[in-house]
Image: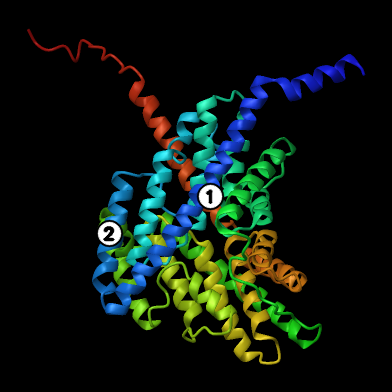
Amino acid sequence: MPLVALKRIRHHWFSPQLWLRRLVLWGGAVCVGAVAILFAMGADQAHLLLRRMIAYSPYLPLVVTPAGLALAVYVTRRIFPGAEGSGIPQVIAALQIQDTKLRGSVLSLKIAVGKIVVTLFGLVAGAAIGREGPTVQIGASIMHAFGKFVRFSRQETERGLILAGGAAGVAAAFNTPLAGIVFAIEEMSRSFEERTSGTILTAVILAGITSLAVLGDYPYFGYTSAYLPLDSAWIAVLVCGAGGGLAGGIFSRLVIASTRGLPGRVGALKRNSPILFAAACGLVLALLGLLSDSTTYGTGYHEARSVLEGNGNVPVGYGILKLLATAVSYASGVPGGLFSPSLAVGAGFGVNVSQIMPYAPAGAVVLLGMAGYFAGVVQAPITAFVIVVEMTDNHQLAVPLMATALVAAATSRLVCPSPIYKALSEGFLTSARGSKTSEVHAKAPAAKSVETPAQKPDG
């Protein structure tokens, strides 16, 4: 065997530095999986508490939701800055930040803790938010913390760990390993780098194994056997794709606009009194809850699953009401994601489409609605159809779902040219770079004033 090959083998199998990196990656991935499981259990308990409150009186949210969102935003701004919103834009921003210290403004264990605590509190209060986006930031924060402990020297390695943590978070949150890999490639990095591919795969596998070991092998939305015959029912692909893309693009524009500054008195209220603005958003959410028979609160997971199982009883306007509730929740500034609420909105739109297209299988149309709207929001069509396929264990609809997602993403770009997570990440990048500039100016020595004859005091 050539000497070069022997050196490579010795370096690969007996290098302490390489084994340290492997242990960091493996340990971090297992931690991400464990935390994601605990977060999911906490979200289930939050849903139970919310339902008990509504069962006691459907009018309680008129008081609890405004107060809860105001408190959540206050705690986020004062104690956990950087934890607001979905979490995915922060991870995308972190991948572009070169300064390790600046990454701490969007990725840290403190932010991860705040993300969990405040998101769960927001769910109890009735915010229409999800836990999957926050799990991405939590996973990236955990892996980033592990990387800081070992002090990797290469920027590519740190970036790979962040990507791997985010992908592992998606895989563990949805119990969808393939979707975690695809999401990391398609959405968070927007490019596939061979140097980080093995890191991502390993993290996703270990996080997935952790989830399987604790929760078992289960599809997120249960098993569905819906299929779409190759006949006029395929019109639903175009309807759900174009309609979902249009609705998703409009939603994205609303969310992006709310973060960049709303016009008029509403915008002034958000800028000058963010806590009061959050309370006003909570009141709007409570009113939407009353209009929807209390179905627009929370993640939307239970409503979407009941619709897929055929025993759901959501209002006719559930899709649009849930869309508005999700947009208002995000605008309030409370931590929370868009994944589950978007899938629930899509399910609601799917129900509407199935009612006007009785010749197409209702279950299949609901799944097409979910893929179409989700792809319209995130503009990541491969991720959209892979997530829906994995979450329902339905491979018969793979091709129709793929076609729907592609049509939706293309339609959404006509309405919202910039993908939502990319647009939102720019705000965090600007904030991080602005804080660095302020810090540099603060550390710079003050210029000494030169006393000219004209300025010299008398005497």
Disc 1, SS: helix
Give 445 or 242, whichever is nearer the viewer: 242
Decide if residue 137 is in sight here.
no
* Displayed quadrant of residue 65: bottom left
Q: Which residue is denoted by mark 1 in the rendering?
A: 136
User: For the view shown, which residue lies furthest in the left direction?
Assistant: 459
* Displayed quadrant of residue 70: bottom left
> Which residue lies at the image location 27% right of the left edge and 56% below the top edge?
71
Q: What type is the residue that disc 1 sits on?
A: Val
Judge whether 188 appears above or below 219 on screen: above
The percent coordinates of residue 105 (x first, y second) are 43, 38
Checking the image for residue 2, the label placed there is none
> Which residue lies at the image location 55% right of the left edge and 80% below the top edge?
307
Q: Which residue is denoted by mark 2 in the rendering?
A: 70
Instruction: Report the mark closest to the observer, 1 or 2.
Output: 1
Q: What type is the residue that disc 2 sits on?
A: Ala
Q: Is the C terminus in the top left, top right, bottom left or bottom right quadrant?
A: top left
> Which residue lies at the image location 73% right of the left edge and 83% below the top edge?
235
Q: Residues within 10 Å of mark 2 (few under 14, many from 20)?
A: many
The percent coordinates of residue 176 (x first, y second) are 64, 58
Q: Residues within 10 Å of mark 1 (few under 14, many from 20)?
A: many
> Which residue lies at the image location 64% right of the left edge and 31% below the top edge?
22
Q: Is residue 431 left or right of residue 181?
A: left
Decide if residue 373 is in sight here.
yes
Q: Is the N terminus in the top left, top right, bottom left or bottom right quadrant?
A: top right
Disc 2, SS: helix
Judge whether 225 appears above or below 85 on screen: below
The percent coordinates of residue 138 (x first, y second) are 48, 46
- Give the CA separation, mark 1 to mark 2: 24 Å
Q: Is residue 93 left or right of residue 451?
A: right
Q: Earlier in the sequence, mark 1 or mark 2?
A: 2
